[in-house]
Image (spheres, helix red, strand yellow):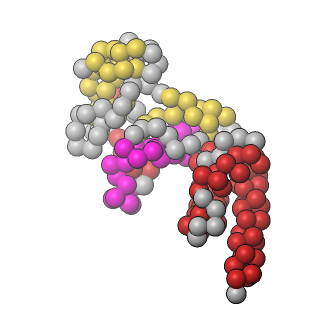
Amino acid sequence: MIIFCNSCIEKREARLALGMDVYPVRKDLRAQPFWVCNTCNNFIGCHPSTIKPLGRMGHTKIFCACCVRKRKVRLTLGTEVYPKYISLHSKPYWICDECNNFVGCHPNTIKPLGCIATKHLRQARAEIHGILDPIWQSGTMSRSRIYKELSNKLGWKYHTASIRNITEAKQVINILSSYRITVESIEGNFI
Ligand SMILES: [Zn+2]
Ligand SMILES: [Zn+2]
C-alpha cells in the first residue's frame, strides 16, 4: 500500500507488520496491525479490527506540557489511552511515548486539539470550561467575544487546549473570575 510518510515527507510504499515487530516494548500491542514505511521504518496503527491506516506514517511533533518541549508523538486510539471507556475506543489520540500523556483530536479528524497536557493540566482545563461556558451560555457575553478578550489579555490566541501550564491556567481563571463578578452584579441590578 502507498501511504504518506511524515518522516520522508512524501508518499511511500508501506508493508503490513505486527506490534511485536514495530513496537516490542508494548506487549499489549503485540497482535495489532501496523503499516511500516519501507524507506524509513516509521509506522502507523490501524482502525479497530481493520488494516485501514489511521493516517500518515511516522511521527508528528506537538508541544508536551509534561516534557516541557516539542516531542515526537504517535497516533493511537482510545483503546490504548482510555481502555475503560468503550465509547472512546475508536477515537484518535496523539500520545507522547516519553511520558505517556496524550491529547485528543478535533471531531472526525486527526488534528490535535492542542498541546499534550498532564493529568493536572487536563483537570485545570476542565475547571476553566466550568467557569467559561456558563458565561456565554447565560448570554451575558458571546463566546467569540470572551475568546477574543482572553486572547488580547493573554497575548496569544486563546483555546483552552492551548494552555501549556498551570501558571497560564491560573491566569485564565483570574481573568474569567472578573467576568463572573460582572455577571452577578448585573443580575443584582435587575432584582
Ligand atoms: Zn518514511
Ligand atoms: Zn511528554
Q: Is residue 40 above or below residue 151?
A: above
Q: Quadrant of residue 108?
A: top left
- Residue 154 position, x and y percent, is 75, 46
Left or right: 111 in relation to 114: left
Residue 100 visible in the picture? no
Q: Residue at x 71, y 51 (%)?
A: 149
Residue lying furthest bottom in this view? 191
Residue lying furthest front in this view? 190
Which quarter shows the N terminus?
Answer: top left
| Closer-to-camera residue (190/157) | 190
Q: How many marks?
A: 0
Q: Is residue 138 above or below residue 174?
A: below
Left or right: 174 in relation to 89: right
Which quarter shows the C terminus?
Answer: bottom right
- Residue 34 position, x and y percent, is 31, 31
- Residue 92 position, x and y percent, is 40, 44
**Residue 89 colored in magenta in the image:** yes
Q: Which residues are magenta?
A: 83-108
**Residue 181 colored in magenta in the image:** no
Q: Residue at x 46, y 37 (%)?
A: 111
| Closer-to-camera residue (40/148) | 148
Q: Quadrant of residue 155?
A: top right
Q: Is residue 64 above or below residue 37?
A: below
Q: Residue at x 40, y 14 (%)?
A: 10
- Residue 24 position, x and y percent, is 40, 33
Q: Is residue 18 above or below residue 155?
A: above
Q: Residue at x 28, y 18 (%)?
A: 2
Residue 89 visible in the picture? yes
| Closer-to-camera residue (85/157) | 157
